Image (cartoon, rainbow, N blue to C red):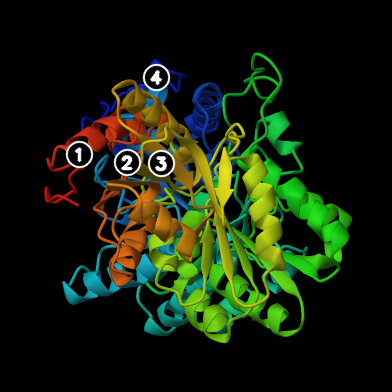
C-alpha cells in the first residue's frame, strides 16, 4: 500500500482521510494532531454511514481505541482481530479504504465486516460473536511454532461478546499458555442492548473508583487475573494517550494481558448517545443530524420481525405457559413488546445461542412452551443443542428464525441459507416457511400449540410479503393458483411464492399448465402433497435456502421413498458463500427471479439441464 510522506498530516474529512494509505501514516501523526484526527474520522463515519446504512454506534465508540491500536501495533505483522467485525470501520479507514465508503455494503463495494479479500490487514471475515479469542489463541500458537517471538496478537472484543461461551473456552487456554496475546475488552456496557448477567455486574464493579490501576500498576484479584491474565485498567477508551500507554505496556509484557477499555457506544453523535434502545447500532439510511430514518413515500409496511413480535404478544396474552428466549437481541428479533408486558417470561441469555437452546429445553421439561428467537445465521452455532438437547427428548420448543435466506448487505456470514438444511436432519422437527404475514401468524399459532416435539419457523429480513390468498386447501397444503391442466407443479417455500406466481403467469401464457402450491409446513411432507406431485408431469421446487440438503431435496427424497416417479428439479441457493448486495439482485444472480424460474421450467420440460449457479470451486451444485 502507498503510505503518506513524512510531512505532518493535517487531518481532514473526505479526501484527507482517503489519503491515509496505511497504518504507517497513522503512526507518523504528531500527538497534537490526534484529537482532531479522531474527530475527522467521527464526522466521516456519520456522513458516510448515515447515507448508506450500516453499523454506526459500534464504530463511533472505537475511534480513539482503533487509532491507538494502530499506533502501538504494526498491522499486519501484528494481527489485530476484531470480534463481531461490525466495529471495524475505523480499522478499514486507517488501512487505506476510506475512499471505498461511498459503496459501503453495496454490491461489489466495501464489506461491512473485515474481509480477507479486501486487505492484508483483515485476518478473517467475522460477524459471529465471541470467536476472536480462539483465532488469537491459534495465531499465537502458530507464531510460537514458527519462532516469531517478536510478533503480537491482539483481539478486540466487546463486553457483549464476552457473554458467549466460546470466549471463555479461549480465555481458559490463553491464560494458561503464557503466550503474548493482548485481549482488549471494549466495555461499553452493551451488545445490541445493555449487557446482562454476572459478567456485566463484575465489570461494573471493576469500573468503580478505587479499582483503577496506573501504568505499571497491578489490579487486585478479578476473574481475569484468576484465569492467568495481567489486568490493565479500566482505561478511558476515548483518551488516546491513556490507551497508548496501556497498550504499550501490554505489548512489552509478552504474556497474556487484558486491557479493559471503557467506551461509549455512539460516542460523539448525540442521537446515538441518547438512543436507549441500541445507540443506533445498525441503521438504514438516516438523517446525519437527527439520526432519524429518512422518510419513505406512503405509510411504512410492517416487517416480518414486527409481525412476529405482535403475533407472539397476542399468544402470550392467551397462554401463561408461553415464554421467550433471545441471545442478546431483544429488539432485533421482535421480543421487546412481550418483554415490556411480561418481563418475567422473556429471558435474554447474552450472546450464547447454545445455552439459549438447552435452557429452552429445561423450560420445556418444566412445563412451559419456549419460543427461541434467533437470526437464522446464529442458529447454526447451536445445531448440536437442537439435535441432542431438544429433539432427542421430543420437547415442545418453537424456534423462530429471523433473517432466513438471502439477507442482503451484511454478506456471507449473515445470509441465513443453511438453517433448513441443518434442521432437515433433525428427527421429529417440523419446519415451516410462511409466504406472507397472515401465514406467519397462523403458523406461529400452530407451532406453539404443538406439544409432541420441536418446530421451526423461518422468514427473511425486511418488509413482510403481501398476503396471497389460496384458491383452495388440500389437507395442510395451500394451492395458490392452478390452470386446470396438471402439467407442472411449482412447489414454493415461503416468500418465494411471489416469484413462482410470476413464473406461472408467464408459463400459462405459453399454454403450459401450472399449479403453484405452498406446503406451509415443509417438513414433514404430507400425503396430500405427495398425491399432488404424483398427478403432475413435472415438479419444480423453489426455496431461499441452499439446494444441498434443503427443503426441495428432502421432498425429492420423500417422493422416491413413496415410489412417486414424477421428475423433480430443485431450485435454490448454490453451495457457495454469497457476497453482499440487495436481496432481489442476489436472488436474480442465482436464478431465482420469476422469469428465471419460468426459464428453468421450460428447460426441464425439454429435458435440458438446468443452469444452476456454480459453486466457488466451479463445480455445479
Residue 395 marker: none
Residue 605 marker: 1
| Dot 1 or dot 2, earlier in sequence | 2
Q: Residues within 10 Å of mark 3 (few under 14, many from 20)?
A: many
Q: Which residue is mark 2?
A: 488
Frontmost residue, 228 versus 332: 332
| Dot 1 or dot 3, earlier in sequence | 3
Q: Are marks 1 and 2 in contact (CB under 8 Å)?
A: yes
Frontmost residue, 176 versus 102: 102
| Dot 3 or dot 2, earlier in sequence | 3
In this view, 533 is above or below 67? below
- Looking at the image, which residue is at 20% across and 41% down? 604
Left or right of 510 on screen, residue 306: right
User: Element under label 3?
Assistant: helix
Q: Residues within 10 Å of mark 1 (few under 14, many from 20)?
A: some
Q: Which residue is mark 3?
A: 91
User: Element under label 4?
Assistant: helix
Q: Which residue is mark 4?
A: 16
- Eye-nearest disc, 1 or 3: 1
Q: Quadrant of residue 217?
A: bottom right
User: Element under label 2?
Assistant: strand
Residue 244: where, in percent of width, then height?
49, 50
- Looking at the image, which residue is at 49% across and 71% down? 382
Amino acid at each position: 500500500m502507498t503510505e503518506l510522506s513524512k510531512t505532518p498530516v493535517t487531518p481532514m474529512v473526505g479526501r484527507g482521510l482517503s489519503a491515509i494509505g496505511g497504518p504507517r501514516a497513522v503512526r507518523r501523526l504528531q500527538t497534537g494532531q490526534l484529537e482532531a484526527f479522531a474527530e475527522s474520522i467521527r464526522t466521516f463515519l456519520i456522513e458516510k454511514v448515515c447515507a448508506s446504512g450500516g453499523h454506526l454506534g459500534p464504530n463511533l465508540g472505537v475511534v480513539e481505541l482503533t487509532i491507538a491500536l494502530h499506533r502501538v501495533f504494526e498491522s499486519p505483522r501484528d494481527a489485530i482481530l476484531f470480534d463481531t467485525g461490525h466495529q471495524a470501520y475505523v480499522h478499514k479507514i486507517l488501512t487505506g479504504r476510506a475512499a471505498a465508503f461511498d459503496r459501503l455494503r453495496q454490491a461489489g463495494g466495501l464489506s461491512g465486516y473485515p474481509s480477507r479479500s479486501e486487505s492484508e490487514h483483515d485476518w478473517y471475515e467475522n460477524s459471529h460473536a465471541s470467536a476472536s479469542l480462539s483465532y488469537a489463541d491459534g495465531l499465537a500458537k502458530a507464531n510460537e511454532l514458527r519462532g516469531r517471538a517478536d510478533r503480537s496478537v491482539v483481539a478486540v472484543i466487546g463486553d457483549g461478546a464476552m457473554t458467549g461461551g466460546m470466549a471463555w473456552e479461549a480465555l481458559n487456554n490463553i491464560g494458561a499458555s503464557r503466550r503474548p496475546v493482548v485481549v482488549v475488552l471494549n466495555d461499553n456496557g452493551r451488545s445490541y442492548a445493555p449487557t446482562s448477567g454476572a459478567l456485566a455486574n463484575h465489570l461494573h464493579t471493576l469500573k468503580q473508583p478505587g479499582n483503577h490501576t496506573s501504568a505499571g500498576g497491578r489490579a487486585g484479584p478479578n476473574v481475569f487475573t484468576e484465569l492467568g491474565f495481567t489486568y490493565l485498567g479500566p482505561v478511558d477508551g476515548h483518551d488516546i494517550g491513556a490507551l497508548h500507554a496501556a497498550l504499550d505496556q501490554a505489548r512489552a509484557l509478552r504474556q497474556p494481558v487484558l486491557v479493559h477499555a471503557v467506551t461509549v457506544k455512539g460516542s460523539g453523535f448525540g442521537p446515538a448517545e441518547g438512543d436507549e434502545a441500541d445507540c443506533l447500532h445498525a441503521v438504514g439510511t438516516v438523517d446525519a443530524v437527527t439520526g432519524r430514518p429518512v422518510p419513505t413515500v406512503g405509510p411504512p409496511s410492517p416487517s416480518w420481525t414486527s409481525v412476529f413480535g405482535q403475533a407472539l404478544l397476542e399468544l402470550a396474552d392467551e397462554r401463561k405457559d408461553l415464554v421467550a428466549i433471545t441471545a442478546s437481541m431483544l429488539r432485533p428479533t421482535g421480543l421487546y413488546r412481550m418483554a415490556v408486558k411480561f418481563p418475567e417470561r422473556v429471558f435474554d441469555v447474552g450472546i450464547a445461542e447454545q445455552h439459549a437452546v438447552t435452557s429452552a429445553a429445561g423450560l420445556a421439561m418444566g412445563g412451559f412452551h419456549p419460543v427461541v428467537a434467533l437470526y437464522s445465521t446464529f442458529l447454526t452455532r447451536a445445531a448440536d443443542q437442537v439435535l441432542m438437547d431438544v429433539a432427542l427428548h421430543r420437547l415442545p420448543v418453537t424456534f423462530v428464525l429471523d433473517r432466513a435466506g438471502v439477507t442482503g448487505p451484511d454478506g456471507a456470514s449473515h445470509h441465513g441459507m443453511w438453517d433448513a438444511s441443518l434442521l432437515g436432519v433433525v428427527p421429529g422437527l417440523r419446519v415451516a416457511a410462511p409466504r406472507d404475514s397472515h401465514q406467519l401468524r397462523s403458523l406461529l399459532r400452530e407451532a406453539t400449540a404443538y406439544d409432541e416435539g420441536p418446530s421451526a419457523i423461518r422468514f427473511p429480513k425486511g418488509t413482510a410479503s403481501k398476503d396471497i390468498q389460496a384458491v383452495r386447501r388440500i389437507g395442510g397444503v395451500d394451492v395458490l393458483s392452478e390452470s386446470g391442466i396438471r402439467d407442472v407443479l411449482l412447489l414454493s417455500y415461503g416468500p418465494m411464492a411471489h416469484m413462482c406466481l410470476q413464473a406461472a403467469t408467464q408459463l400459462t401464457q405459453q399454454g403450459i399448465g401450472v399449479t403453484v402450491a405452498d406446503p406451509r409446513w415443509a417438513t414433514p411432507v404430507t400425503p396430500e402433497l405427495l398425491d399432488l406431485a404424483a398427478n403432475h408431469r413435472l415438479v419444480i421446487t423453489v426455496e431461499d435456502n441452499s439446494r444441498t440438503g434443503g427443503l426441495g431435496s428432502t421432498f425429492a427424497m420423500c417422493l422416491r421413498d413413496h415410489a412417486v416417479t414424477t421428475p423433480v428439479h430443485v431450485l435454490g441457493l448454490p453451495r457457495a458463500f454469497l457476497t453482499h448486495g440487495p436481496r432481489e439482485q442476489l436472488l436474480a444472480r442465482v436464478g431465482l427471479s420469476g422469469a428465471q424460474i419460468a426459464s428453468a421450467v421450460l428447460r426441464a420440460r425439454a429435458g435440458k439441464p438446468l443452469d444452476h449457479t456454480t459453486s466457488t470451486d466451479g463445480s455445479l451444485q
